Image: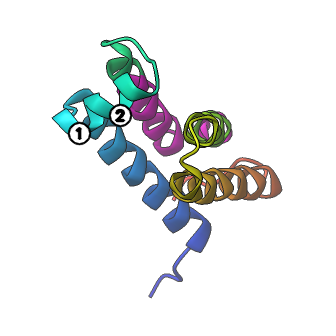
Amino acid sequence: MRKLNWPSVLRWALAAFFVFGGFGNILASETILADYARWGYPDWFHYVTGLIELSVAALLIVWPRHLYGSILGAIVMLAAAGTVVLHGEYTHAIAPLVVASFSVLVGVLTVHSGGDSRA
Protein backbone atom coordinates (compact mmCIF):
# COMPACT_ATOMS: atom_id res chain seq x y z
CA MET A 1 0.00 0.00 0.00
CA ARG A 2 1.30 3.44 -0.94
CA LYS A 3 2.01 5.94 1.83
CA LEU A 4 -0.12 9.11 1.76
CA ASN A 5 1.89 12.10 0.55
CA TRP A 6 0.48 14.89 2.77
CA PRO A 7 2.16 17.77 0.85
CA SER A 8 0.35 16.59 -2.28
CA VAL A 9 -2.90 16.22 -0.37
CA LEU A 10 -2.52 19.78 0.92
CA ARG A 11 -1.75 21.06 -2.59
CA TRP A 12 -4.78 19.29 -4.08
CA ALA A 13 -7.04 20.54 -1.26
CA LEU A 14 -5.80 24.07 -1.88
CA ALA A 15 -6.43 23.64 -5.61
CA ALA A 16 -9.98 22.45 -4.86
CA PHE A 17 -10.53 25.51 -2.67
CA PHE A 18 -9.48 27.78 -5.54
CA VAL A 19 -11.67 25.91 -8.04
CA PHE A 20 -14.73 26.38 -5.82
CA GLY A 21 -13.75 29.97 -5.08
CA GLY A 22 -13.18 30.69 -8.74
CA PHE A 23 -16.56 29.39 -9.82
CA GLY A 24 -18.14 31.07 -6.81
CA ASN A 25 -16.83 34.40 -8.01
CA ILE A 26 -17.57 33.86 -11.70
CA LEU A 27 -21.13 32.73 -10.92
CA ALA A 28 -21.44 35.31 -8.15
CA SER A 29 -24.58 35.47 -6.06
CA GLU A 30 -26.29 38.77 -5.31
CA THR A 31 -24.56 38.76 -1.90
CA ILE A 32 -21.12 38.44 -3.45
CA LEU A 33 -21.92 41.11 -6.04
CA ALA A 34 -23.07 43.42 -3.23
CA ASP A 35 -19.79 42.78 -1.40
CA TYR A 36 -17.76 43.74 -4.46
CA ALA A 37 -19.86 46.90 -4.91
CA ARG A 38 -19.47 47.81 -1.22
CA TRP A 39 -15.70 47.44 -1.54
CA GLY A 40 -15.69 49.77 -4.56
CA TYR A 41 -14.77 47.28 -7.27
CA PRO A 42 -16.25 47.58 -10.79
CA ASP A 43 -19.17 45.34 -11.78
CA TRP A 44 -16.93 43.00 -13.81
CA PHE A 45 -14.21 42.52 -11.20
CA HIS A 46 -15.66 39.29 -9.80
CA TYR A 47 -14.93 37.67 -13.17
CA VAL A 48 -11.28 38.71 -12.94
CA THR A 49 -11.05 37.34 -9.41
CA GLY A 50 -12.68 34.07 -10.45
CA LEU A 51 -10.39 33.60 -13.44
CA ILE A 52 -7.31 34.28 -11.34
CA GLU A 53 -8.49 31.76 -8.75
CA LEU A 54 -9.04 29.13 -11.45
CA SER A 55 -5.55 29.91 -12.74
CA VAL A 56 -4.16 29.33 -9.25
CA ALA A 57 -5.90 25.95 -9.14
CA ALA A 58 -4.52 24.97 -12.54
CA LEU A 59 -0.99 25.98 -11.56
CA LEU A 60 -1.24 24.02 -8.32
CA ILE A 61 -2.33 20.91 -10.21
CA VAL A 62 0.03 21.01 -13.20
CA TRP A 63 3.59 19.95 -12.45
CA PRO A 64 6.09 21.77 -12.51
CA ARG A 65 4.08 24.95 -11.86
CA HIS A 66 3.19 24.26 -8.20
CA LEU A 67 5.44 27.03 -6.90
CA TYR A 68 3.85 29.63 -9.20
CA GLY A 69 0.40 28.53 -8.10
CA SER A 70 1.29 28.80 -4.44
CA ILE A 71 2.77 32.30 -4.94
CA LEU A 72 -0.23 33.54 -6.93
CA GLY A 73 -2.61 31.94 -4.43
CA ALA A 74 -0.91 33.72 -1.53
CA ILE A 75 -1.07 37.04 -3.40
CA VAL A 76 -4.78 36.62 -4.17
CA MET A 77 -5.60 35.75 -0.57
CA LEU A 78 -3.49 38.61 0.82
CA ALA A 79 -5.32 40.97 -1.53
CA ALA A 80 -8.65 39.60 -0.28
CA ALA A 81 -7.54 40.05 3.34
CA GLY A 82 -6.34 43.55 2.57
CA THR A 83 -9.66 44.45 0.97
CA VAL A 84 -11.73 43.45 3.98
CA VAL A 85 -9.30 44.96 6.49
CA LEU A 86 -9.33 48.29 4.63
CA HIS A 87 -13.11 48.24 4.94
CA GLY A 88 -13.09 47.46 8.65
CA GLU A 89 -14.26 43.84 8.24
CA TYR A 90 -11.44 42.45 10.35
CA THR A 91 -12.94 39.05 11.15
CA HIS A 92 -13.46 38.42 7.43
CA ALA A 93 -9.70 38.57 6.97
CA ILE A 94 -9.14 35.39 8.99
CA ALA A 95 -10.09 32.89 6.26
CA PRO A 96 -8.02 34.54 3.50
CA LEU A 97 -5.03 34.76 5.84
CA VAL A 98 -5.34 31.06 6.68
CA VAL A 99 -5.52 30.14 2.98
CA ALA A 100 -2.58 32.46 2.24
CA SER A 101 -0.63 30.63 4.94
CA PHE A 102 -1.44 27.28 3.37
CA SER A 103 -0.35 28.67 -0.01
CA VAL A 104 2.98 29.73 1.48
CA LEU A 105 3.35 26.31 3.09
CA VAL A 106 2.73 24.59 -0.26
CA GLY A 107 5.36 26.86 -1.81
CA VAL A 108 7.89 26.06 0.89
CA LEU A 109 7.21 22.34 0.57
CA THR A 110 7.55 22.59 -3.20
CA VAL A 111 10.92 24.31 -2.93
CA HIS A 112 12.03 21.88 -0.22
CA SER A 113 11.15 18.90 -2.40
CA GLY A 114 12.99 20.38 -5.35
CA GLY A 115 9.67 21.13 -7.04
CA ASP A 116 9.18 17.45 -7.87
CA SER A 117 5.86 16.75 -6.16
CA ARG A 118 4.05 15.03 -9.01
CA ALA A 119 1.70 12.91 -6.96
Report x, y in % for residue 58.
44, 35
Q: Is residue 52 magenta?
A: yes
Mark-to-mark CA distance, 2 and 1: 6 Å
Question: Residue type at mark 2?
Answer: Asp
Count of labels shown?
Answer: 2
Farthest residue in the bottom direction?
1
**Tag of residue 65:** none
Q: Residues within 10 Å of mark 1 (few under 14, many from 20)?
A: few
Is residue 50 shown left or right of residue 78?
left
Which residue is under mark 1?
31
Residue type highlighted by circle 1: Thr
Q: Which residue shows up at 53% across the image and 48% down it? A: 89
Residue 46 versus residue 17 in the image, above or below: above
Tell me what residue is drawn at x 32 percent, y 20 percent.
47
**5 or 33, nearer to the observer:** 33
Q: Which residues are magenta?
A: 49-69
Q: Quadrant of the N terminus?
A: bottom left
Callouts 2 and 1 close, C-beta under 8 Å:
yes
Q: Residue at x 57, y 34 (%)?
A: 83
Asked whether 6 or 31 is in front, the reply is 31
Q: Residue at x 23, y 39 (%)?
A: 31
